[in-house]
Amino acid sequence: MLLLTIALSGRSTDTTTGFDLAAESVRTDLHASQTELTELNRTIAREKLPLARQVSTQEARTAARRDELQSAQSQAKEAREIVAGLESETGTADQEIGFLVSALAEFGHFLETKVHISELRRHGELIEAAEAAADDVNLTDRQRLELQFELLERATVRVEELLGGQTFAGSALSPDGQLLPGRFVLAGPVAVFAAEQGEAVGIAQLEVNSLDPIIVPLTGSSSNQVRTLAADGKGLFPVDPSGGRALQLEGQRETLGEHLWKGGAVMIPILTLAVLAGLLAIVKWIQISRLRTAHPADVELILKQLAAKHKDKAIAHARALRGPAGTLLETAIENADQKKELLEEMLYEQVLHMRPRLERWLPFIGLTAAVAPLLGLLGTVTGMINTFKLITLFGTGDAKTLSSGISEALITTECGLIVAVSALLIHAVLTRSIRGFITSLEQAAVGFVNGLALRRDDQ
């Protein structure tokens, strides 16, 4: 079309020739294009089947790959679920291992407190290793468990050995502080020890701040039995149902002098007051027990003798009574001729004169009852001051160091209260007895005066 247009616009004289040439060219191009198209169709026809086959193959492969991908994704999902389950199981297992390590560590602490002091040297190293393994970050869980299971196995073997008793070599402290080698015999919670040399034989007990036990000595046949048992592994085993407490109490038993000595300097005035009050109480009790009371029958007899003009017999009977009662009646007989009022005053004066003699030293006993608790309180204060001084110097770790001050504080209070209560009771008894005797004197005096007045009225 382009060539035709050019040909037309060119206004050539040979219009037909130009048009033919263009048409020929077009036909040539068209023929070439048809030929090329035919070849191309043939080529397509030839290659279409292989390409279709390739497409089918690729589609099949794609489908297979897709299936494989889906299978792989499914397997990956299952694997992730399995991994999550394994991680959960691993976490649970770690927790169980941690709990087991902690429980075994606690078992080690418990075993250390329950093992007998005589066995501490035998098992102490393994116990410490098992306890330290629980907190050692450089060890794996397997290594920790191996150490702790070893301790558990040792504890099991120990229980089996204890069922029938066991003997083993060791060392113990004698009562004077010497470390002696010997052999232990252990049965249950009780252990006895026999030294290789010397006479140190007894029950092994815990000593504060010491890794070695102390020997609580046994005497008599028990010591020979223990020595034979330690040497031969056979014999009688001494058993203390109190777990050794009875022997400890026996060892701590002290005499009265030792007990009072622990009270310190304040015990001197307390004991002095106690002794003086006790002596005075004995003297006053003897004095009161010797006093004779004037009974109404004695007064009546004296009045009858006076009425019969037998004054000498009346005086003799009054003197036979002895003591204040006889003196009072003798004064009454000597002044029987006086007026009633005057006689009453004379007899009342006689009673007042006798009262101080009868009540002599009773105020001192009452003073003892009042002062003794105060002295005990003073000892308590001084004892606590000494205790705080010892705490300042040595701390509170050793109870034996503090026992002296505490003993002084408690013993002085104890003795002060004992002395005070005793003095108070004695003072009350003696005062009541003396008041009763004075009352009997007053009754005798009143009875004499009234009886004498009635007989005068009758006359």
Image (cartoon, rainbow, N blue to C red):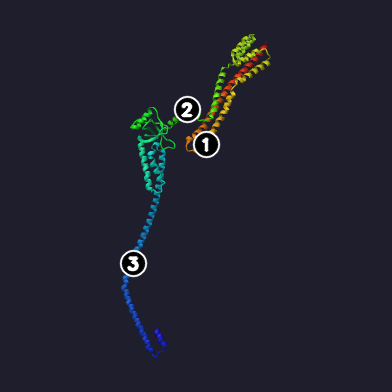
Label of residue 58 in the image: 3
The residue located at (44%, 30%) in the rendering is 251
Q: Residues within 10 Å of mark 1 (few under 14, many from 20)?
A: some
Q: Are marks 3 and 2 in contact (CB under 8 Å)?
A: no
Distance, label 3 to label 2, CA atoms, is 114 Å
Q: Residues within 10 Å of mark 3 (few under 14, many from 20)?
A: few
Q: Horizontal and vertical percent for residue 296?
A: 61, 15
Q: Can residue 189 be seen from the camera position used here?
A: no
- Which residue lies under the disc numbered 2? 255
Q: Three-letter amino acid code at disc 1?
A: Lys
Q: Three-letter amino acid code at disc 2?
A: Thr
Query: Where 353 sits versus 175, above or below?
Result: above
Q: Three-letter amino acid code at disc 3?
A: Gln
Q: Horizontal and vertical percent for residue 290?
A: 56, 17
Front-most of 207 and 324?
207
Q: Earlier in the sequence, mark 3 or mark 2?
A: 3
Label of residue 389 in the image: 1
